[in-house]
Image (cartoon, helix red, strand yellow):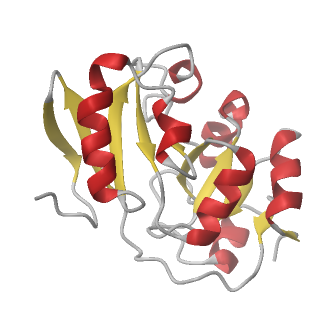
Amino acid sequence: MNDQFQVTDLALKLKQGSLALFPTDTLPAICSYPKYSQKIWTIKKRPLNKPLILMGGCLEDLFEFVKPCAIEDGLKMAKNYWPGALTIVLPTVGNLSNYLNCNSNSLGFRVPALKLARDLLLETGPLATTSANISGKSPVKDALEASIQFPGIPILAPIPWPNSSGMASTVVDWNEGKWKVIRAGSVLLN
């Protein structure tokens, strides 16, 4: 098993440029600060055209990066489904999308339902995240499997992690006031 760290100590490792593994309500995640996100693509062997998502501990931490034209619709969606298993793709302001999505100025945003994950994200601020598995392989189910796929990556304690749904988040994309489901997942939209 990889070295285990409590929230505050893991946040410090992340600030120093480390990757980390942590549980969410959907699937275990691998994360970094956005400026170190290239490490995620490398270790996962993930194609660069597959973006990462920005996960935050609360919607206020994420919506500061959303383009003003999408804020109203985005907030309505977020308030209905967050915290939870919905990833909302919205256009961004600033250059944050350069770190997470090299093909677009939009990003997927999510606030997970799992309190332990939100505790970490509230301590660190928003993190670049994706599921903790080698690209193209089955998702890992728990801390032990995450440690086996990514030996040496610090892991959030306590272990065992709370159970996750084992199903990826639903992804919806906003375009000029209309929503489109990009990936069906554990959330069904009304």
Residue 155 image-quadrant placement: bottom right
Residue at 15%, 57% (x, y): give it.
189
Q: Position of residue 13 (x, y in %)?
A: 87, 50
Residue 81 image-quadrant placement: bottom left
Give the left or right position of residue 28, taking residue 187 as reference.
right
Residue at 51%, 22% (x, y): give it.
97
Q: Position of residue 17 (x, y in %)?
A: 83, 38
Q: Is residue 163 above or below residue 43?
A: below
Q: Position of residue 115 (x, y in %)?
A: 58, 70
User: Between 73 and 183, which is closer to the camera in this rendering?
Assistant: 73
Quadrant including the N terminus: bottom right
User: Between 185 and 90, which is closer to the camera in this rendering?
Assistant: 90
Whether residue 152 is visible to the viewer of this picture, yes or no, is: no
Residue at 60%, 38% (x, y): give it.
41
Quadrant including the C terminus: bottom left
Residue at 59%, 24% (x, y): give it.
99
Q: Position of residue 188 (x, y in %)?
A: 17, 63
